[in-house]
Image (tube, rainbow, N blue to C red):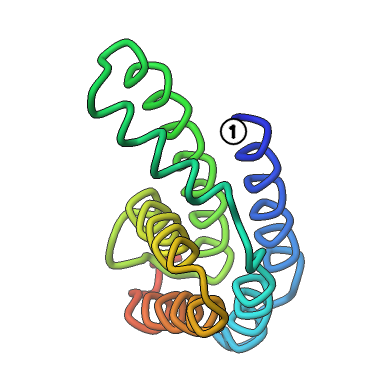
Amino acid sequence: MRDHLVGVVAKFEDLAAAITNTAIENGDVSLALAQAGNYFKALSPRSNWSTLAVEFQLHANRSAAFADDYGAMRAEFQQRIGAALGRIFVHLGLRPPIPAEEFAMGLVSTSIGFAIQGDALSFEARGRYMSAVFRALLLSSEPIER
Protein backbone atom coordinates (compact mmCIF):
# COMPACT_ATOMS: atom_id res chain seq x y z
CA MET A 1 0.00 0.00 0.00
CA ARG A 2 2.84 2.37 0.83
CA ASP A 3 4.41 1.79 -2.60
CA HIS A 4 1.05 2.31 -4.29
CA LEU A 5 0.49 5.60 -2.46
CA VAL A 6 3.97 6.81 -3.44
CA GLY A 7 3.00 6.13 -7.07
CA VAL A 8 -0.29 8.00 -6.72
CA VAL A 9 1.52 10.97 -5.19
CA ALA A 10 4.04 10.95 -8.05
CA LYS A 11 1.23 11.10 -10.61
CA PHE A 12 -0.47 13.93 -8.71
CA GLU A 13 2.82 15.80 -8.43
CA ASP A 14 3.23 15.33 -12.21
CA LEU A 15 -0.19 16.95 -12.66
CA ALA A 16 0.83 19.84 -10.40
CA ALA A 17 4.08 20.25 -12.36
CA ALA A 18 2.21 20.24 -15.68
CA ILE A 19 -0.15 22.94 -14.44
CA THR A 20 2.53 25.07 -12.76
CA ASN A 21 4.74 24.87 -15.86
CA THR A 22 1.96 26.40 -17.95
CA ALA A 23 1.70 30.16 -18.25
CA ILE A 24 -1.52 31.68 -16.93
CA GLU A 25 -2.82 34.71 -18.78
CA ASN A 26 -5.25 37.16 -17.19
CA GLY A 27 -6.34 34.72 -14.50
CA ASP A 28 -7.55 32.16 -17.07
CA VAL A 29 -7.81 28.79 -15.32
CA SER A 30 -9.33 26.87 -18.23
CA LEU A 31 -6.12 25.02 -19.12
CA ALA A 32 -5.60 23.98 -15.49
CA LEU A 33 -9.21 22.76 -15.38
CA ALA A 34 -8.71 20.73 -18.56
CA GLN A 35 -5.45 19.20 -17.28
CA ALA A 36 -7.01 18.27 -13.93
CA GLY A 37 -10.14 16.94 -15.64
CA ASN A 38 -8.04 14.68 -17.84
CA TYR A 39 -6.15 13.44 -14.77
CA PHE A 40 -9.32 12.64 -12.83
CA LYS A 41 -10.93 10.89 -15.80
CA ALA A 42 -7.80 8.75 -16.30
CA LEU A 43 -7.80 7.35 -12.76
CA SER A 44 -7.70 3.57 -12.76
CA PRO A 45 -11.26 2.30 -13.23
CA ARG A 46 -10.73 -0.97 -11.39
CA SER A 47 -8.88 -0.48 -8.20
CA ASN A 48 -8.48 -3.14 -5.58
CA TRP A 49 -6.37 -0.53 -3.79
CA SER A 50 -9.51 1.36 -2.81
CA THR A 51 -11.07 -1.74 -1.30
CA LEU A 52 -7.81 -2.50 0.50
CA ALA A 53 -7.71 1.08 1.85
CA VAL A 54 -11.19 0.62 3.31
CA GLU A 55 -10.17 -2.71 4.85
CA PHE A 56 -7.02 -1.15 6.31
CA GLN A 57 -9.07 1.70 7.79
CA LEU A 58 -11.49 -0.76 9.37
CA HIS A 59 -8.55 -2.67 10.84
CA ALA A 60 -7.05 0.60 12.10
CA ASN A 61 -10.34 1.33 13.85
CA ARG A 62 -9.88 -1.89 15.85
CA SER A 63 -6.11 -1.89 16.40
CA ALA A 64 -4.31 1.04 17.99
CA ALA A 65 -0.90 -0.28 16.94
CA PHE A 66 -1.95 -0.65 13.31
CA ALA A 67 -3.77 2.70 13.45
CA ASP A 68 -0.55 4.51 14.36
CA ASP A 69 1.37 3.14 11.38
CA TYR A 70 -1.49 3.36 8.91
CA GLY A 71 -2.48 6.82 10.11
CA ALA A 72 1.06 8.12 9.65
CA MET A 73 1.18 6.70 6.12
CA ARG A 74 -2.19 8.25 5.23
CA ALA A 75 -1.25 11.58 6.79
CA GLU A 76 1.95 11.79 4.73
CA PHE A 77 0.01 10.85 1.59
CA GLN A 78 -2.63 13.51 2.15
CA GLN A 79 0.01 16.11 3.10
CA ARG A 80 1.90 15.52 -0.15
CA ILE A 81 -1.28 15.64 -2.25
CA GLY A 82 -2.26 18.81 -0.36
CA ALA A 83 1.16 20.35 -1.05
CA ALA A 84 0.78 19.61 -4.77
CA LEU A 85 -2.69 21.18 -4.75
CA GLY A 86 -1.30 24.15 -2.85
CA ARG A 87 1.31 24.69 -5.57
CA ILE A 88 -1.44 24.67 -8.19
CA PHE A 89 -3.49 27.28 -6.34
CA VAL A 90 -0.46 29.52 -5.73
CA HIS A 91 0.52 29.27 -9.40
CA LEU A 92 -2.98 30.31 -10.39
CA GLY A 93 -2.82 33.20 -7.92
CA LEU A 94 -5.69 31.83 -5.84
CA ARG A 95 -6.39 31.15 -2.17
CA PRO A 96 -8.76 28.17 -1.91
CA PRO A 97 -11.79 28.42 0.40
CA ILE A 98 -10.53 25.38 2.36
CA PRO A 99 -6.98 24.31 3.18
CA ALA A 100 -5.33 22.30 0.42
CA GLU A 101 -4.87 19.27 2.71
CA GLU A 102 -8.62 19.18 3.39
CA PHE A 103 -9.25 19.38 -0.35
CA ALA A 104 -6.79 16.48 -0.78
CA MET A 105 -8.64 14.46 1.86
CA GLY A 106 -11.92 15.08 0.07
CA LEU A 107 -10.51 14.05 -3.31
CA VAL A 108 -8.99 10.86 -1.89
CA SER A 109 -12.19 9.97 -0.03
CA THR A 110 -14.27 10.65 -3.13
CA SER A 111 -12.01 8.56 -5.31
CA ILE A 112 -12.12 5.62 -2.89
CA GLY A 113 -15.88 5.91 -2.45
CA PHE A 114 -16.59 5.86 -6.17
CA ALA A 115 -14.04 3.10 -6.82
CA ILE A 116 -15.54 0.69 -4.29
CA GLN A 117 -18.93 1.02 -6.00
CA GLY A 118 -17.29 -1.06 -8.72
CA ASP A 119 -19.37 -0.41 -11.82
CA ALA A 120 -18.69 1.43 -15.08
CA LEU A 121 -21.13 4.22 -14.25
CA SER A 122 -19.30 4.92 -10.97
CA PHE A 123 -15.94 5.15 -12.73
CA GLU A 124 -17.23 7.68 -15.25
CA ALA A 125 -19.08 9.60 -12.56
CA ARG A 126 -15.96 9.80 -10.38
CA GLY A 127 -13.99 11.69 -13.03
CA ARG A 128 -16.87 14.08 -13.71
CA TYR A 129 -17.52 14.64 -10.01
CA MET A 130 -13.88 15.23 -9.08
CA SER A 131 -13.47 17.61 -12.04
CA ALA A 132 -16.59 19.52 -10.97
CA VAL A 133 -15.35 19.81 -7.38
CA PHE A 134 -11.94 21.01 -8.57
CA ARG A 135 -13.64 23.57 -10.82
CA ALA A 136 -15.92 24.76 -8.02
CA LEU A 137 -12.99 25.23 -5.66
CA LEU A 138 -10.99 27.14 -8.27
CA LEU A 139 -13.90 29.39 -9.12
CA SER A 140 -14.76 30.04 -5.47
CA SER A 141 -11.18 30.87 -4.54
CA GLU A 142 -10.09 34.40 -3.73
CA PRO A 143 -7.23 36.02 -5.63
CA ILE A 144 -3.96 36.18 -3.71
CA GLU A 145 -2.86 39.77 -3.12
CA ARG A 146 0.45 40.27 -4.91
Along the line of sight, the residue nearer the viewer: 3 or 137:
3
Q: Residue at x 61, y 80 (%)?
A: 37
From the viewer's perspective, is 3 left or right of 108?
A: right
Q: Amino acid at mark 1?
A: Met
Q: Residue at x 36, y 66 (%)?
A: 96
From the viewer's perspective, is 80 left or right of 78?
A: right
Q: Where's residue 109, x and y in %? A: 38, 56
Q: Where's residue 112, x and y in %? A: 45, 57
Q: Residue at x 32, y 53 (%)?
A: 102
- Label total for image: 1
Determine which quarter of the picture holds residue 14: bottom right
For label 1, the residue is 1
Compared with residue 17, is residue 67 higher up or lower down, i.e. above or below?
above
From the viewer's perspective, is 68 left or right of 11?
A: left
Q: Residue at x 44, y 70 (%)?
A: 94
Q: Where's residue 145, x and y in %? A: 39, 67
Crowding at label 1, few (<14), some or many (≥20) Cα neighbours within 10 Å? few
Along the line of sight, the residue nearer the viewer: 133 or 48:
48
Compared with residue 131, is residue 11 higher up or lower down, i.e. above or below?
above
Compared with residue 65, is residue 23 higher up or lower down, i.e. above or below?
below
Give the quadrant of the N terminus: top right
Residue furthest to the top in view is 65
